[in-house]
Image: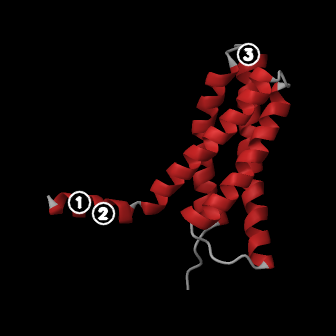
Amino acid sequence: MRAGWKRWADLYHRYEETFWYLVFGGLTTLLNLAVFYVLYEWMHIDTVVSNVIAWIAGVLFAFVTNKLFVFRSEGWNGKKVWWELGTFVSARLFSGVFDTVFLVAFTEWWIHFPAMPVKVVSNILVIIMNYIFSKWIVFRKKTE
């Protein structure tokens, strides 16, 4: 029985960063989808406007959780936090534009699918993109 727990503990420590990225990435995605849903479906706000507001909410939540819990980037001093925030928002702008174009293309320009299923598919692609940007650019560990 103890060997099984040790194996799980070893796996957790080996993939801890990925695990927490999936947890907080999932929460960010839920936040993004919820904000979009309320604005688009309930309040009947334009697709792009709803998506941009949902993106802003997600980026703010994701920056703090990625910095503190996923990549454990230390320090909130001016230069470092501004560089991280700037590169984080820049990378998220790229994936946010992708998300918006994907959403509009499949709901308004081409096939006219319902917005929420398209938004879910787009968010899966965005999660992968954002992990790569965050791990290798924004919160990369400096080698000595």
Of 38 and 8, the residue lying toward us: 38
Q: Mark 1 sits on what residue? A: 5
Secondary element at tag 3:
loop
- On residue 9, which mark appears? 2
Query: Is the C-beta separation of discs 2 and 1 under 8 Å?
Result: yes
Q: Inspect the image, locate mark 3, and give the three-letter code of the amino acid beneath it.
A: Trp
Q: CA distance from mark 2 to mark 1?
A: 6 Å
Q: Earlier in the sequence, mark 3 or mark 1?
A: 1
For the point 51% across and 49% down, the residue is: 22
Label 2 SS = helix
Q: In screen coordinates, is 56 left or right of 72?
A: right
Q: Quadrant of residue 15?
A: bottom left
The quarter of the picture where the N terminus appears is bottom left
User: The C terminus appears in which quarter of the rendering?
Assistant: bottom right
Give residue 55's position: percent from left, percent from top. 75, 42
Q: Residue furthest top?
A: 112
Amino acid marked by disc 1: Trp
The picture places residue 120, in percent across and down from the top left corner, at 61, 30
The answer to whether residue 94 is visible is: no
Residue depth check, mark 3 versus mark 1: number of the one nearer the observer: 1
Q: Residues within 10 Å of mark 1 (few under 14, many from 20)?
A: few
Q: Which residue is mark 3?
A: 110
Mark 2: amino acid: Ala
Specify whether 123 is left or right of 79: left
The answer, for residue 96, to whether it is visible in the render is yes
